Amino acid sequence: MSELILGIESSCDETGVALVRTREQGQAPELLAHALHSQIEMHQAYGGVVPELASRDHIRRVLPLTQSVLEQSGHALADVGLVAYTRGPGLAGALLVGAGVACALAAALDVPVLGVHHLEGHLLSPFLSADPPQFPFVALLVSGGHTQLMRVDGVGRYALLGETIDDAAGEAFDKSAKLMGLGYPGGPALARLAEEGDAQAFRLPRPLLHSGDLDFSFAGLKTAVLTQARKLGDELEARKADLAASTQAAIVDVLVKKTLAALQSTGLRRVVVAGGVGANRQLRSRLDAACAQRGVRVHYPELHLCTDNGAMIAMAAAMRVQAGLAQPQRDYLFDVKPR
Ligand code: KG4
Ligand code: ZN
């Protein structure tokens, strides 16, 4: 039997709401509508996300976005059979907004709620595309807070193969961008500038490239970028594009090499790339080329669903429900897990 699931994402600086319909076993759930509000402009003046402002803006946006999703889909709120929300990780106050609204709506509708892990949302986001992956696959999860390689055998069947021991890949992009005065959000700005630069211009470290395991480390790279920027001094402005291109190349090199190593060690022939850094064009083209040579399929979420959104949360909830793994709650004790 199909069921309508409303999903709410509010873990950081995007408010996302979506409506998904579950389908029979073996068929991916169907996205009916989704709506997103990005807070980027609001935080830009501060050079980064201000948690208190983020929470307040989620409060302002979440109900109008819900209204918009219902209007787009032609459904009434009363048709919703389950409300899903991001339980964590993320900013505590921001998470509480989504959880609180989800529980209030569910209580009013007398339907259950389901807390979803934000990373599971990213991980399953490629199932929102027209050509979804098949299990099993290797997943490269690259967001602002996480960098992980996983073996994914099915919904809820995730084995961690390796992860960052310090900064995440997105953090490496963001912090390097900040050092170069590129503002917030740094990742996309650095990637844009890198297109005009020479990736060979500066020799930057590729930490743990030959470590023999599937772990990552990006803290040293950030320090190397800082050292290089200081060395350049007044010349930095003129060489910024080269430094951006060299930084991006160092990050992408490590991500591609370790992903190939994960494919090798698992013997799997499919990769899913998810999370904000999955929007990076250089990463996509380098990984596509390397995988094509090896006969490996690469799946990405649609570009606009790489960064945080409600569709991935509703999708993850629906896939859990269809797999019989969801434990929806009716006590409405909205609990969040910031870490
Ligand atoms: O998945 P996401 O939206 O939020 C988290 O769950 O963290 O990822 C955000 C991260 C940020 O670090 C942002 O700079 C990075 O993804 N990002 C990019 C690009 N677009 C977003 N990094 C590199 N190139 C991009 N095009
Ligand atoms: Zn995210």
Image: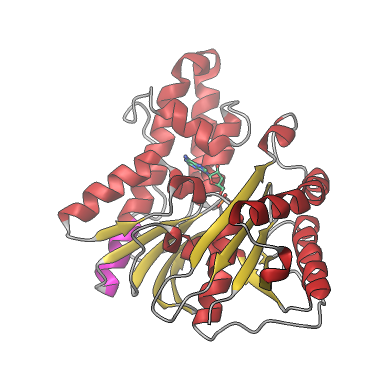
Q: Quadrant of the C terminus?
A: bottom right
- In terms of depth relative to the viewer, which is nearer, 277 or 321? 321
Task: Depth check: give the residue in front, 313 or 76.
Answer: 76
For image coordinates 82% across by 77% down, the residue present is: 333
Q: Is residue 277 above or below residue 327?
A: above
Q: Is residue 35 magenta?
A: no
Count of numbered marks: 0
Q: Is residue 312 left or right of residue 265?
A: right
Q: Residue at x 37, y 61 (%)?
A: 272
- Determine the residue positioned at 81% across, 43% down: 53
How has the structure been colored for display? Answer: secondary structure
Q: Dominant secondary structure of the magenta stretch? A: helix
**For residue 66, what is the image quadrant?**
bottom right
Residue 246's place in the image compared with 211, above or below, is above
For residue 43, above or below residue 31: above
Q: Position of residue 19 (x, y in %)?
A: 60, 62
The residue range painted magenta reads 258-266
Task: Classify 116 as above or below 301.
Answer: below
Can residue 272 be seen?
yes
Give 337 or 317, whichever is nearer the viewer.
Answer: 317
Q: Is residue 210 visible?
A: no
Question: Can you give x and y, in whole percent of width and height, for residue 154 in the image?
Answer: 41, 78
- The answer to whether 159 appears left or right of 287 in the picture is right
Q: Nearer the viewer, residue 81 or 92?
A: 81
Image side of residue 131 versus residue 63, left or right? left
Residue 288: horizontal and vertical position, in percent? 27, 49
